[in-house]
Image (spheres, rainbow, N blue to C red):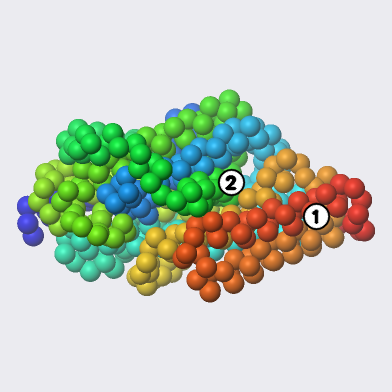
Amino acid sequence: MTPTQIIILSAISVYFAAMILIGLIASRNQSHDGFVIGSRDVGYIPTIGSLASSFRDGMGVVFWFGFGATAGYGGLWLIVGAVAGLFLYALIGPRVRELAKKHDYITIGEMIRARIGVVSEKTTALIVIAFALAYIAIQLFVSGNLFATVLGIEAWIGVVSVAVVVGFYLFFGGYSTVVKTDAIQFFLIISLILVPFFFQPGKEDVMNIGTLFSQSVDFQWGIGLLGFFLVLGSADTWQRVFSARNDKVIRASFPLAGVMLGIMTLSLIFLGLAAKPYLGENIAAEKAFFLIFEGDYIPSWLLAYIAVVVMAICMSTLDTMCYLTAATIGKNFMPPRVTERREQYVPLSRIVMVVILIAMSVLALTISDVIQFLFNASSLLFILAPVYLAVALGLPHRKHRETDVLITLSVVASTIIYLFLFVNGYFDGSLMMTMIPVGVSIMLTGIVLVMDKYGLINHSTK
């Protein structure tokens, strides 16, 4: 090993040890409620940190660094859309939190079941699971390839290492550990704003604000809407609403998380701008980040720090999605007699999380085009945004079997359209094409809600 490789490996090992220690400490004297939902007493800083770090996933590092190196600020429209979505949460979140606390909801799927019906709950939960599994695989892919590039080893070693560490602290700490580690990881991630002071981008590149409009209008709208619907359709974001200490935490933390997300994104763009002169011409955006570990133009200690932060980013999203998937499977698909009692639910949740990490480690090793994989997975999730907003706003007004079936058909029809566009390669040509399935979902869900309001559906109470 070279001195640089030893430094990077040592830094990552120390970080892994710290995460394991947090899991062990969190497991001591922890109640089953703390394992499941964090006791619904999460304050400002943990909520802000957990939200911002969860949206800055491993793929985000690759994407924003690569975009900074190849296109400057042109991708920031995604952040504009995401911030708009977080402000919407600040408006409707307090009401949703009160409902979740009153009825002991752990997942947004449980709220759908109570407001619409079990058929819609199962359908939306399946989409959440599919998306979350894809995101888990993406984080394992990025971390594994980082190991392979930095240390000159096989990617599977990195994938397995990250999966074992995350599995360990999730197994012992559950949701409370997710919040604690996310908050720590948030401060690591936000510290990337210091990197440009040590590895400075050119002043001309930094001041070239015109690159914000360098992409086509189609791309600007497409990526902006992608950010907006990604936030609204993310079940783990609703999880932050459920666990917030009070309404004030929601109203303040969600917008501030958007600000922090913007700062973190700019730091990655600046890093890409700084590396741009060393990467050569015609570098693919998805490969640019990994190339910095093959050169000698960045100090070893700074490369080690960047590697640790990237691991923190990957693991932050990984533990959130893993917990979310286990909770969704347990609460939405297991018999109530198994999940109603925390003493039975917690061991089941632990087993499910371990199985998920093993299965997605295998999937991660099969990914080739990770950016396209990300966009495809995200656009499937958008379909759920109209349904989530409906239940958050107290719609439909009454629970009926027919409305449940019609909402389900709306989601299924949108999913079929998504699959058709995906299989035939329509998403590859334009980001706006990813908005077609969610547009259909909005239209069909809206029609059902209007029909329900004006009594145009023959109801039989469920």
Tag 1: Cα neighbours inside 10 Å, few (<14), some, or many (≥20)?
A: some
Q: 104 or 93, which lies in front?
A: 93
Q: 42 or 313, which lies in front?
A: 313
Q: Amino acid type of disc 1?
A: Val
Q: Amino acid type of disc 2?
A: Leu
Question: Is the residue 431 above or below the residue 227 in the image?
Answer: below
Q: Position of residue 232 (x, y in %)?
A: 58, 46
* Mark closer to the chain start, 2 or 1: 2
Question: Is the residue 421 above or below the residue 210 in the image?
Answer: below
Residue at the spot x=47%, y=30% of the render?
Answer: 256
In the shown orientation, is residue 358 left or right of residue 152? right
Give how far apart the Cα atoms at labels 2 and 1 are.
20 Å
Residue at the spot x=17%, y=48% of the render?
Answer: 277
Tag 2: Cα neighbours inside 10 Å, few (<14), some, or many (≥20)?
A: many
Dot 2 and dot 1 residues touching (CB under 8 Å): no
Q: 356 or 231, which lies in front?
A: 231
Q: Secondary structure at mark 2?
A: helix
Residue 232 numbered mark, or none:
2
Q: Secondary structure at mark 1?
A: helix
Question: Which quarter of the picture shows residue 271?
Answer: top left
Q: Position of residue 191 (x, y in %)?
A: 29, 35
Looking at the image, can residue 68 be seen?
Answer: yes
In the shown orientation, is residue 94 left or right of residue 194? right
Residue at the spot x=56%, y=40% of the render?
Answer: 85
Q: Position of residue 330 (x, y in %)?
A: 60, 59
**To which residue does mark 1 refer?**
448
Q: Position of residue 396 (x, y in %)?
A: 80, 47
For the C terminus, give its image quadrant. bottom right
Question: Which quarter of the picture shows residue 76?
Answer: top left
